[in-house]
Image (cartoon, rainbow, N blue to C red):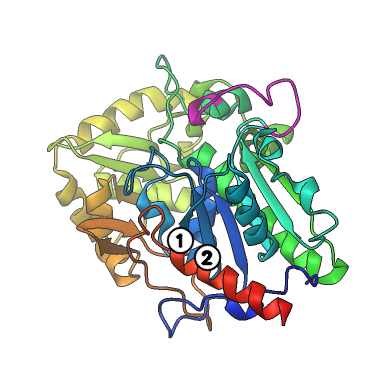
């Protein structure tokens, strides 16, 4: 670590849970408050033990815009700075100099106009890893264009394979683009650059474009296409909701059951569980049989409730699962056994992931209010300045 960035090492906060020792303990990250992907990335890093400090704008206490809810700021500390003022910019510069990494999710050029772009730190903090996440990337003809998750999915091609025949494309809200292609790829890039900086002594800028990340997440589909195993025709592609064994079907009570019996052995067991004994399992991939058999499967599943199907198919190991609501998913026996969710302020939140054999991650708690740690952080900076001068 550079001389400038090591000044505040002794002032880095230990986890609020004293028994926690996440693998990122001792790493400090400065996050510029924004929407969706950047806060999500910061939350993941905080869950893993990093000291993540969010620089919030001076807005009314407790208020945040969509995509930057308190739940995404758990484990972090919040300081309010007016980045349009000289004093606010100076403090932000000092905070970033005290850190191993910084993350931001604004349009290209915003941080430069605030005097906080990565070039500012090249000489004074050469080991800084500077993570940037945007929809379209830092360069290219769309770099300055507005967009949201659904737009990135559309342009990446991912949305085109998320549709049912004759229906408009649809995809889960924010999961694939903002969080998958954006936040997770930013976290991966950030950690990779931090590891590399330990060897080279130099940081670098990570340009995490959601569009790029979605392309990478589509790697399996691209591989199948290149090997001639992917058809653009829904009638010939079980992934595109046309087969009788890979889709969601409505039950008698209005609930839904998901089927994923791709392999022959699972398909044979599924037919057994559904009572379709006259169907030849060997015709599994005969697409000519799919429409008629799909209708039979749909009719059959609609004769019982979701709970009854769960009970009847539980021991067959045939790739079947109920489609659960968010609350049902959190309360499911498997999720409970793995402590996959925690209840905070009356609401379920996902637990930190992944699991580690030695490192104990922080216990999730409510995120800070805007500016909750301003005085604490400023006191740390003042103590570090005083220590450096002596």
Mark 2 secondary-structure assignment: helix
The answer to which of 201 and 335 lies nearer the viewer is: 201
The answer to which of 106 and 338 lies nearer the viewer is: 106
| Magenta-span inclusion, residue 150 | yes
Q: In which quarter of the image is the C terminus?
A: bottom right
The answer to which of 68 and 223 lies nearer the viewer is: 68
Q: How far apart are marks 2 and 1 (CA)?
A: 6 Å
Residue 279 seen in this snapshot:
yes
The reply to whether discs 2 and 1 touch (Cβ–Cβ < 8 Å) is yes
Is disc 2 surrounded by few (<14), some (14 to 19) or many (20+) residues within 10 Å?
Answer: some
| Numbered tag placed on residue 305 in the rendering | none
Say which residue appears at 71% left-offset and 52% top-offset: 130
Question: What segment is highlighted magenta in the picture?
Answer: 137-151
x and y percentages locating residue 364 in the rendered image: 37, 67
Residue at the extreme top? 166
| Magenta-span inclusion, residue 66 | no
x and y percentages locating residue 351 in the rendered image: 38, 64
């Amino acid at each position: 670590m550079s001389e400038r960035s090591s000044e505040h090492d002794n002032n880095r906060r230990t986890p609020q849970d004293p028994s926690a020792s996440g693998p990122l303990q001792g790493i400090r990250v400065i996050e510029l408050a924004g929407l969706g992907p950047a806060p999500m990335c910061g939350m993941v890093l905080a869950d893993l033990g990093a000291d993540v400090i969010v620089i919030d704008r001076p807005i009314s206490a407790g208020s945040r815009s969509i995509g930057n809810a308190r739940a995404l700021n758990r484990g972090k500390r919040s300081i309010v700075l007016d980045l349009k003022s000289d004093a606010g910019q100076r403090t932000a510069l000092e905070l970033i100099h005290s850190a191993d990494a910084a993350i931001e999710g604004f349009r290209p050029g915003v941080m430069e106009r605030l005097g906080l772009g990565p070039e500012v730190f090249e000489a004074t903090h050469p080991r800084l890893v500077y993570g940037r996440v945007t929809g379209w990337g830092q360069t290219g003809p769309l770099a300055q264009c507005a967009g949201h998750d659904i737009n990135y999915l559309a342009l990446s091609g991912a949305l085109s394979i998320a549709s049912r025949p004759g229906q408009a494309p649809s995809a889960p809200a924010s999961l694939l683009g903002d969080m998958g292609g954006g936040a997770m790829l930013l976290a991966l890039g950030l950690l990779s650059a931090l590891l590399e900086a330990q060897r080279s002594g130099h940081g670098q800028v990570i340009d995490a474009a959601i569009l790029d990340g979605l392309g990478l997440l589509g790697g399996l589909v691209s591989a199948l296409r290149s090997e001639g195993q992917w058809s653009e025709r829904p009638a010939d592609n079980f992934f595109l909701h046309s087969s009788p064994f890979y889709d969601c079907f409505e039950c008698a009570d209005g609930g839904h059951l998901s089927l994923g019996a791709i392999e022959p052995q699972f398909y044979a067991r599924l037919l057994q569980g559904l009572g379709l004994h006259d169907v030849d399992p060997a015709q599994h991939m005969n697409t000519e049989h799919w429409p008629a058999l799909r209708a039979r499967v749909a009719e059959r599943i609609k004769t019982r409730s979701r709970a009854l199907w769960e009970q009847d198919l539980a021991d067959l190991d045939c790739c079947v699962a109920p489609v659960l609501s968010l609350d049902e998913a959190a309360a499911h026996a498997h999720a409970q056994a793995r402590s996959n969710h925690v209840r905070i302020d009356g609401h379920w939140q996902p637990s930190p992931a992944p699991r580690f054999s030695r490192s104990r991650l922080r216990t999730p708690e409510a995120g800070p209010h805007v500016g909750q740690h301003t005085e604490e952080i400023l006191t740390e900076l003042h103590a570090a300045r005083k220590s450096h001068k002596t």
